[in-house]
Amino acid sequence: MSLSPDRKAIAERAIQKTFEQSSVAWQALPHWDTQDPGQAFIRNDVIFSFRAGQPVALQKEPVGLDPLEPLPLKARFRITLAQATAPTPDALLASVIARTVTLAREFDDAVVDQLIAPYTGGEATLAGNSRSDWLISWPAATAKKSATANPKPRKILPQLLFGRARLEDSGYRAPCCLIASTKHYNNLVAWVNGDIVLPKLQAGANVDSVHRTSRLDTAVAGGAATLMLGRMQEFPNGKASDVSPGEEPVDLAISVPPSLEVIGENADGNVELAIRIRFATRVKDQRGIVVFHT
């Protein structure tokens, strides 16, 4: 048994819209379609990497050619035959939307893990004397006795500006993006003198979008972390799909977009389905990622 073309198209549109609204990585990072769902390897256009033992400078050799293997993610589920063939698609949409949200979270976790990987031990596995320039401490809370105390904005802004300087020196002068842990996000949106400080911090550090993910809550040596992503192009918040990925330090190569797969009827007479995505995270210029950690 299979879904009708019209019913499958309705589900596909719901999956794409929900994924775009739910995924931090999809909103913050440019992505491109490889046009080959069966592609086994994706080119890795690395132009700069902080690999240990190598000089911190652009190399004369061609861009990194070691290919990446796309990572498949899927969420399987079942619906009854009556739900699949009902006059309205409500039951099908309820099922696919809930699973799409789950898949989007797994997708975000996988992408964030790739971006934060060199720093998870509390030390950047980088080369040269610039090791700490892209791994920056987040200011400590001002009130030692309060578990909920926030660092003062005047202490946060200099650290953000220090990270911003690293990005600008690397050529990424467009407004940047922050992906923050829950703790750091609470610091950024603290209520000070009757006003939320986030807009002022954004203006000072030239940040045009801020996202939060729980994946960064214990990302660096068990402590909270925040990623500052440099950008070559300026684009609206959440509109990463509208820009050219080739100019940015990080992009996502999508071989299978968020979509519905109809597996078929199982032994119980139910219809088995799956929501899937297959992708690779390409970190092409490590200078375009600054990590703040507690």
Image (tube, rainbow, N blue to C red):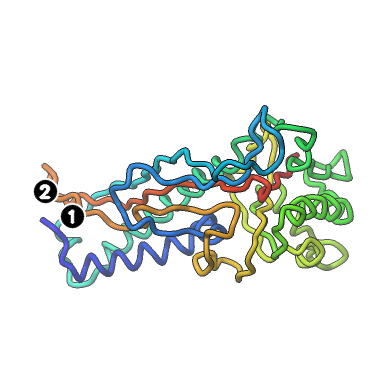
Residue at image location 33% in from the left, 61% down from the top: 94
Local packing at callout 2 (Cα closer than 10 Å; few below 14, some 14-19, many 20+) is few
Of the 4 image quadrants, the one containing the C terminus is top right
Whole-number angstrom distance, CA of label 1 to CA of label 2: 7 Å
Residue 113 spot, x, y in % from top left: 55, 40
Q: Residue drawn at (37%, 48%), measured in percent from left and top?
A: 278
Which residue occupies the foreground of this view, 222 or 245? 245
Between disc 1 and disc 2, whose residue precedes?
1
Work out whether 168 lies above or below 138. Answer: below
Image position of 131 (left or right of 1): right
Q: Amino acid at mark 1?
A: Thr
Quadrant position of the N terminus in the picture: bottom left
User: Which residue of the protein is positioned furthest toward the top in this rendering?
Assistant: 53
- Apparent side of residue 212 relative to residue 281 in the rendered image (left or right): right
**Circle 1/circle 2 CB separation < 8 Å:** yes
Q: Residues within 10 Å of mark 1 (few under 14, many from 20)?
A: some
Q: Which residue is mark 2?
A: 269
